[in-house]
Amino acid sequence: MTRRLLLVTGTDTGVGKTVVSRGILRACVRAGTAIFPLKLAETGCAVDDDGELLPSDGIALAKAAGREDLEHVAPLRFTLPASPRSAAMHEGRPLSLGQLMECVDVAFNQSELVLLEGAGGLMVPLADQLDFADLAQELRARVLVVARDALGTLNHTQLTLEALRRRGLGVLAVVLNATSAKPCSLAHRQELQRLNPRAQIWGPLPWLPNATDDELADAIEGAGFSPNALG
């Protein structure tokens, strides 16, 4: 079995990683492409009446992919809204590379293609001396970068791409995503394409705060994504 992993990372927190991931997952489901969603470590989880931690991103990803095994989709959950390392240390449950890799292996037991949604940006700490970039190297992942279509995105995106290139990580694409109803008048796609002539720059995706999974799939496919790109 050839294991393939797509890491969906962001240039910052709140840029729309889950929105883009939902669209990709649903587009794959519609195309008959087997894919498993993984929110490896979700922080800022709410607590229900039974004391169970509710991973809102993990729940959304599972729904988009038509999965019910949430314990595998979102295996590591924490209440503190912080980096996975900080949240885990706060609860006295420090994470390790071995523990993280066990969760990834469980995901690969479900499908040879896994979409891993990160937390925050590429360099967010997961454990001591381990961030998402390190994990991506360990897993030989391809990376999709979600960037906010707003003022300041050029610097954040270029820094993320430079970090990926220094590590020799392949970039599937950069996806520009609208994060507010106010349209952005700046030509970020054209400028990013000029700065990165060999890269795929998709979007910007429209502001879709209440979109269904199918509407997000339509949007990401319209921006340039095809399930065949994950082959």
Image (cartoon, grey):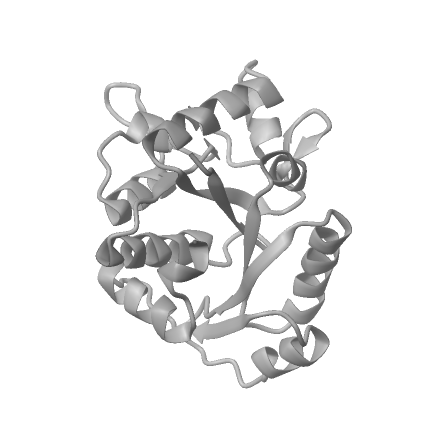
Q: Residue lying furthest right in this view? A: 166
The residue that appears at 48% across and 42% down in the rendered structure is 4
Front residue of 33/72: it is: 33
Q: Is residue 184 above or below residue 62?
A: below
- State the residue in front, 159 or 85: 159
Which quadrant would the N terminus be assigned to in this image? top left
When the figure is inspected, residue 52 is found, relative to residue 218, above or below; the finding is above
Can residue 11 be seen by looking at this rendering? no
Taking the spot 45% from the left edge, 26% from the top edge, the residue there is 105
Q: Is residue 117 above or below residue 162?
A: above
Instruction: From the top left corner, tell me how far across and down residue 73 is, in percent.
Output: 35, 33
User: Can I make out residue 116 in this image?
Assistant: yes
How far from the left and from the top, in percent, is residue 91?
53, 17
Q: Position of residue 39 (x, y in %)?
A: 43, 37
For residue 55, side relative to residue 95 (left or right): left
- The answer to which quarter of the image holds residue 106 is top left
